[in-house]
């Protein structure tokens, strides 16, 4: 039987951990994760020295996966609302089409085991989307409120939208747009841009 490459084993652990964290919570035992990965518990620690290391690597893996989905194609220029809608579409479709990934990332976001360095790297992976968010926030009704507050509100709407989209794939596009309209009204309000306004790159 051909020997499985280390990278494949490592990915198998991440996949198993992601699934089990969604099913059982972040307290899922490493022994169960190892078994689901086809490894012994001792062998698992050859890939991840501690469970905290596993949590952080999975967090970064999911952030990078989301970033790849968001930036899989060139981002269009144009009016702020159009650019925000494109970012929203790519973000929510990622979560709707991969609900286990979305739910695992949501759980990891609240974990005290995710280090400041991992959070910083995760933010860097989505830096372009973050800048777009800041641009909308700066001219909307929440401009005087902390950015983190606005992000939290929109993220909650995004999660609800992803779940709404996943529950009825045939109606995904309409549900995605409904979620965006709600999010836009929260963070942007009645923003109007001059016709033909374009983002300076």
Image (cartoon, rainbow, N blue to C red):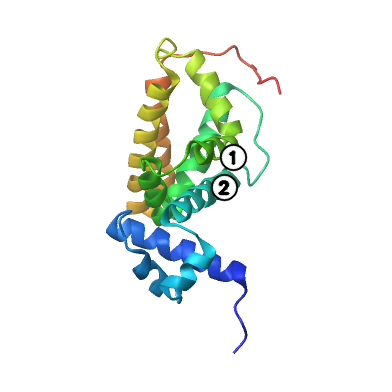
**Up-down: is 50 above or below 145?**
below
Estimate the x, y position of residue 97 in percent, counting from the top left. 45, 54
Instruction: Please identify the quadrant where the C terminus is shown.
Output: top right
Please name whichever residue, 137 or 80, is drawn nearer the observer in this view of the structure: 137
Packing grade of label 2 (10 A; few <14, some 14-19, many >=20) is: some
**Up-down: is 127 above or below 60?**
above
Estimate the x, y position of residue 198 in percent, counting from the top left. 66, 20
Position of 120 with respect to 73 (left or right) is left
User: Which residue lies at the image location 33% right of the left edge and 46% below the top edge?
Assistant: 164
Estimate the x, y position of residue 190 in percent, counting from the top left. 43, 14
Provide the secondary structure element on which disc 2 rests: helix
| Farthest-out residue, left | 24
Provide the secondary structure element on which disc 1 rests: helix
Give me the disc on residue 125: 1
Estimate the x, y position of residue 5 in percent, counting from the top left. 62, 74
User: Which residue lies at the image location 48% right of the left edge and 49% below the top edge?
Assistant: 56
Position of 11 with respect to 100 (left or right) is right
Give me the disc on residue 24: none
Please name whichever residue, 177 or 90, is drawn nearer the observer in this view of the structure: 90
Give me the disc on residue 64: 2
| Farthest-out residue, right | 201
- Is residue 82 shown to the viewer in this render? no
Position of 106 with respect to 124 (left or right) is left
Instruction: Please identify the quadrant where the N terminus is shown.
Output: bottom right
N-term-proximal mark, 1 vs 2: 2
**Up-down: is 159 above or below 14?**
above
Cα separation between marks 1 and 2: 6 Å
Dots 1 and 2: beta carbons under 8 Å? yes
Please name whichever residue, 171 or 32, is drawn nearer the observer in this view of the structure: 32
């Amino acid at each position: 039987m051909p020997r499985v490459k280390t990278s494949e084993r490592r990915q198998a652990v991440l996949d198993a951990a992601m699934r089990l964290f969604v099913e059982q919570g972040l307290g899922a035992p490493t022994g169960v994760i190892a078994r689901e990965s086809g490894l012994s518990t001792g062998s698992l620690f050859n890939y991840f020295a501690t469970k905290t290391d596993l949590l952080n690597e999975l967090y970064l893996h999911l952030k990078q996966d989301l970033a790849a989905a968001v930036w899989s194609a060139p981002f269009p220029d144009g009016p702020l609302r159009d650019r925000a809608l494109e970012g929203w579409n790519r973000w929510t479709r990622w979560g709707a089409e991969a609900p286990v990934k979305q739910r695992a990332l949501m759980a990891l976001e609240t974990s005290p085991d995710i280090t400041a360095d991992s959070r910083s790297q995760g933010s860097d992976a989505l830096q372009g989307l973050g800048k777009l968010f800041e641009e909308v926030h700066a001219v909307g009704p929440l401009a005087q409120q902390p950015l983190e507050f606005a992000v939290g509100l929109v993220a909650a709407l995004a999660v609800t939208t992803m779940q709404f989209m996943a529950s009825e794939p045939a109606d995904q596009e309409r549900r995605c747009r409904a979620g965006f309209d709600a999010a836009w009204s929260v963070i942007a309000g009645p923003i109007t841009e001059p016709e033909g306004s374009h983002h300076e790159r």
